[in-house]
Structures are given as structure tokens and as C-alpha cells.
Image: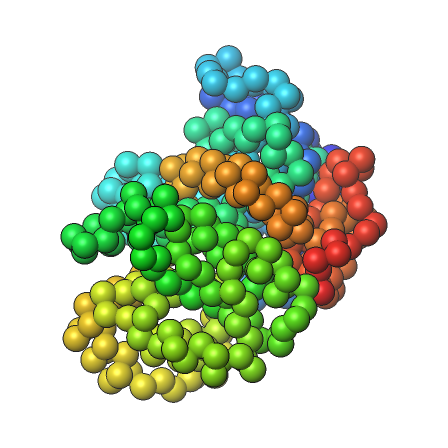
């Protein structure tokens, strides 16, 4: 079968022939891959900044944002049927008996660092015509989400963050979560840093949860992303508009960082209200040391009871929640959700996706020739 693989030692990215996988355990499922989303992680792996093949391979098959269709089921599998649409989890647990996170099925909280991740670290990914994996790492997506279900994996980041946010907000007895979610009473304010796929999906999830949401991006409005942000009820703020944001300084209950730009992130901490939450989702590239006012950050964190939270990858509960949230968001804002997918590319155009500059929000490599589009979404820049 055809796959897209990176060769870290020879610095190559290319289509290769790879043995088609077969079910070897009764608990496995075989998928025909439909869509694989491309993100900054894939491009950084293709720039040879990180990424690790399986121990017995000189190459790593790419792809961790996936949508597949069930074509074969192992005899011990229940709850799946041939033809089901499936999103497959990325991270696999370490094998250390002392790692309580992995032993309890919460490998996204692995304490040893010896986890593997499909398409990233130690296991082949989903950028292949067929994939076999354990059923326990798969989640069924409704057929109605066929065109957008590839967004589930990046949406799990927001789903996991919202799980943590709910838990943290419960420390504040005057915050009524049910009223917030029903959009009754006073709204809490959220600022999202970045208008890429993770940021926009996070902004939609926060709006859906009941936050009055602002999205910061560098490009001045109006532009395609500002129009998209406004279409689902959030407010777009650019570098030039920051003066208009001053009235919210000290009144933002949650910042959702989705840029990986540390200087911007720490600058944004000045808008945090007392008892607020700052969520990091981006990973800065290795580079020059930056300087921040650490005293001010520490002073505010202590005196204002602020919570600084990092979140990475996601467990099955977040995948299930993300599928449910995507269904809800697509009912509320169907045009906006569809516009997140800028373009579907055929396998032959893999280089433009992985080492080029395709632009837009979320580009997808599609193994389903009927879904490949040559037209860029009208919402894309």
C-alpha cells in the first residue's frame, strides 16, 4: 500500500510502498483511511526537528489527525460494524508498572515520558491507505460528520482543557456552571491566542460552553479569519485593535493559548482577572532565550489565585466529548465549521502540504478521491 513517510537520518520525505497491515489480534480493527489532517507537528517532523520511527524501522509513517472507515473487525471486538466511521487516538501508554496514569488508561498524563504516539514518536501514523489498531483506541463518529470528523483530534485539545476548566471553576462557589452552559446570567470572558485550527476550534468550544470569547490574531481585520470568528459569535482582535481590548484587562477569566509563541503568551497574562485560568496548548520551537517579567507573573499568580495549566494530547473521554461537541457546533454554526477545512489534497500533492506553504486553516490529505477538492474555501486567506 502507499504511505507517506519521513526518513530522519537521510532527511527525506516521500511516498513509499509499505506492507498492508493485517489483523493479528482478536481485539483489532482494520480501517481504510479517508482523511488525514495536517498540522504544524507534521511539518516540524518533516523539517527533521523531531519525530522518531519505530525501533525496527528507518522511517516513520506520518499522520496523527485521522478519519477512517472500518473494513474488518477482529472476533473479540464489540460495538463496531463494517462501514463505521472511526477516529483513532494518537498516544499509547508506556509499559512501566509504576506509571499510574498509563495503567489507568490515562496515557495523556504519562509520568515517565516513555509513551509512544502514532505518526510522531515510536509508532507509524495514519498517512497510509490502511491502518490496523486496537479497538480500545478507536471512537465511532456519526456518518453525518463525514466531511468534518477529521477535526476531532485537534478539537480534543479544547475538550480536555474544558474538562480541566470545569474542575477548576468548581472551586468558586459563586460560579454556576449550568447557567454558564445555558448562556444565562453574566458571561465569563475568554481570550484565545491564535486563529489557526486549534485556536478556532477552541474558540468555538468556548463559545459553545458559554464564554464570551475573543480571538487574537496578528492580521488586521477585516480578513477571512475575522469573518469566520464573527460568524460563530466571537470577537476578533488584531495587533492593531489591542487598544480596543483595554477595557477587558483584568476581567478575562480564561486565556486559551494556541500559538506556541511564548512572548505573546506571557504578555497576555496581564489581562487575567483574579481567580482566572491560563491554558497553554502550544509548544514553542527551540530557539533563543526570551525574557519575561517573572516577578509580575509570580506575584499575580499568588495574589490573584490564578491557575496556569498545560495540556497535551487527550484521552478517550476527550475524543468522545470532541465528537459530541463537533456535532453540536456543526448544528449551531454549519458554515463556520465547514470553513475550517480549507482544502483536501490528493496523495500526490503531499509535498505541498508537508514542506510547502499551503495556507488556510486546516488542510487535509485525502485517500478518498471523490472528496478531493481543487477549490480553496472562501473563508481561507
297 horizontally vs 86: left or right: left
Q: Position of residue 97 (x, y in %)?
A: 26, 40
Q: Residue 109 appears at what percent x and percent y?
A: 32, 49
Viewer-nearest residue: 152 or 90: 152
Is residue 43 visible in this depiction of the protein?
A: no
Taking the view exactly as shown, the residue that stands out farthest to the front is 185
Vertical placement of 9 versus 26: above or below?
A: below
Name the residue at 58% across, 46% down.
Answer: 333
Q: Residue at x 33, y 41 (%)?
A: 106
Please give the name of the residue rendered at 65% of the width and 47% of the height, measured from the top-left corner. Answer: 335
- Seen in the image, is 6 located left or right of residue 377? left
315 relative to 336, above or below? above
Splitting the image into 4 quarters, where does residue 127 fall? top right
**In terms of image quadrants, where is residue 289?**
bottom left
* Coloration of the structure image: rainbow
Give the residue at the far top of this rendering.
Answer: 75
Q: Is residue 155 above or below residue 273?
A: above
Observer-nearest of 372 and 107: 372
Amino acid at each position: 500500500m502507499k504511505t507517506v513517510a519521513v526518513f530522519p537520518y537521510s532527511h527525506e520525505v516521500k511516498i513509499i510502498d509499505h506492507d498492508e497491515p493485517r489483523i493479528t489480534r482478536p481485539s483489532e480493527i482494520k480501517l481504510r483511511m479517508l482523511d488525514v489532517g495536517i498540522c504544524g507537528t507534521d511539518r516540524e517532523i518533516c523539517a527533521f526537528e523531531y519525530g522518531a520511527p519505530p525501533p525496527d524501522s528507518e522511517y516513520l509513517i506520518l499522520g496523527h489527525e485521522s478519519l477512517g472507515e472500518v473494513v474488518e473487525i477482529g472476533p473479540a471486538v464489540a460495538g463496531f460494524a463494517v462501514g463505521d466511521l472511526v477516529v483513532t487516538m494518537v498516544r499509547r501508554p508506556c509499559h512501566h508498572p509504576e506509571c499510574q496514569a498509563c495503567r489507568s488508561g490515562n496515557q495523556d498524563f504519562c509520568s515517565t515520558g516513555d509513551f509512544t504516539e502514532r505518526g510522531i514518536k515510536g509508532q507509524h501514523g495514519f498517512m497510509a491507505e490502511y491502518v490496523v489498531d486496537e479497538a480500545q483506541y478507536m471512537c465511532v463518529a456519526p456518518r453525518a460528520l463525514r466531511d468534518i470528523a477529521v477535526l476531532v483530534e485537534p478539537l480534543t485539545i479544547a475538550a480536555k482543557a474544558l474538562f480541566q476548566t470545569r474542575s477548576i471553576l468548581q472551586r468558586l462557589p459563586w460560579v454556576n456552571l449550568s447557567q454558564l452552559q445555558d448562556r444565562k446570567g453574566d458571561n465569563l470572558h475568554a481570550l484565545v491566542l491564535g486563529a489557526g485550527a486549534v485556536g478556532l476550534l477552541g474558540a468555538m468550544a468556548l463559545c459553545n460552553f458559554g464564554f464570551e470569547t475573543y480571538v487574537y490574531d496578528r492580521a488586521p481585520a477585516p480578513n477571512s479569519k475575522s469573518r469566520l470568528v464573527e460568524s460563530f459569535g466571537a470577537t476578533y482582535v488584531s495587533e492593531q485593535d489591542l487598544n480596543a481590548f483595554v477595557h477587558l484587562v483584568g476581567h478575562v477569566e480564561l486565556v486559551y493559548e494556541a500559538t506556541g509563541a511564548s512572548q505573546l503568551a506571557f504578555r497576555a497574562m496581564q489581562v487575567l482577572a483574579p481567580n482566572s485560568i491560563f491554558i497553554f496548548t502550544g509548544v514553542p520551537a527551540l530557539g533563543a532565550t526570551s525574557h519575561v517579567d517573572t516577578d509580575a507573573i509570580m506575584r499575580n499568580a499568588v495574589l490573584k489565585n490564578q491557575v496556569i495549566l498545560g495540556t497535551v494530547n487527550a484521552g478517550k473521554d476527550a475524543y468522545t466529548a470532541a465528537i459530541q461537541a463537533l456535532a453540536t457546533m456543526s448544528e449551531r454554526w454549519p458554515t463556520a465549521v465547514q470553513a475550517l477545512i480549507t482544502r483536501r489534497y490528493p496523495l500526490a500533492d503531499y509535498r505541498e502540504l508537508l514542506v510547502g506553504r499551503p495556507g488556510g486553516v486546516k488542510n487535509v490529505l485525502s485517500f478518498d478521491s471523490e472528496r478531493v477538492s481543487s477549490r480553496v474555501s472562501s473563508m481561507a486567506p
